Image: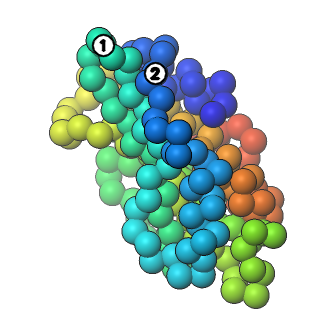
Amino acid sequence: MSVEASRALELITGESRFEASAEEYTIARAADDVVNAYPDLNVGRQDICGVYTPIGKPSFEIKISWDASPSPPTGSPASKFTELRMGERTVAAADKAMVFFSCRGTRLPDSLGLAHLIVMVQHWAVPREFEGDVKALKDAYATVAHSVALAMAKELRCEGNGGLPEKPVLDPV
């Protein structure tokens, strides 16, 4: 995870230290899951990892997962989301963000076309109204989602990193 994403997690959770997910929850394993499922990517949402506050601190859980789509995203996002200029589409809200990107690379057979992947980062809790700087929360979730999506694109060896920039772009569309 990038330094920016680590700082973003601190802003989201209010903590600078986190409990680890189980050892099998890694970007490499998630990328292997994509490769093993390809081209039939109708597997539904799959966990990449979780981020938890340390034991003894107020409980806060972030779920990071991936999914696939048969095509690029279309239509307008829900009103709670701000659309950002990364990948095929990136949307961020005060409690979640999703980065959509396409992948063609050496780990996925070229003859089958593009894989359209989605990385989701969300606060795993009952939805609530947010106080404070909602834009900062949206940017933080988008930063974490970008970091994970970029790592996944690199692990899958997607051409051009799946259209994802090296640093998050937080400017609205």
Residue depicted at x 57% and y 45% = 26
Res 58 → quadrant: top left
Q: Are marks 1 and 2 in contact (CB under 8 Å)?
A: no
Packing grade of label 1 (10 A; few <14, some 14-19, many >=20) is: few
Q: Position of residue 47 (x, y in %)?
A: 44, 52
Residue 107 placed where, x, y %? 75, 69
Q: CA distance from mark 1 to mark 2?
A: 10 Å
Mark 1 lies on residue: 57
Q: Nearer the viewer, residue 104 or 18?
A: 18
Q: Residues within 10 Å of mark 2 (few under 14, many from 20)?
A: some
Q: Residue furthest front?
A: 23
* Secondary structure under the numbered disc 2 in the rendered image: loop
The amino acid at mark 2 is: Phe
Q: Which residue is mark 2?
A: 18
Image coordinates for residue 106, horizontal then vertical, percent? 81, 70
Q: Residue at x 63, y 26 (%)?
A: 4
Q: Is residue 37 left or right of residue 65?
A: right
Which quadrant, please, contains the N terminus?
top right
> At which x and y percent is residue 54?
38, 17
User: Which residue is found at the position 30% from the left and 13% from the top?
Assistant: 57
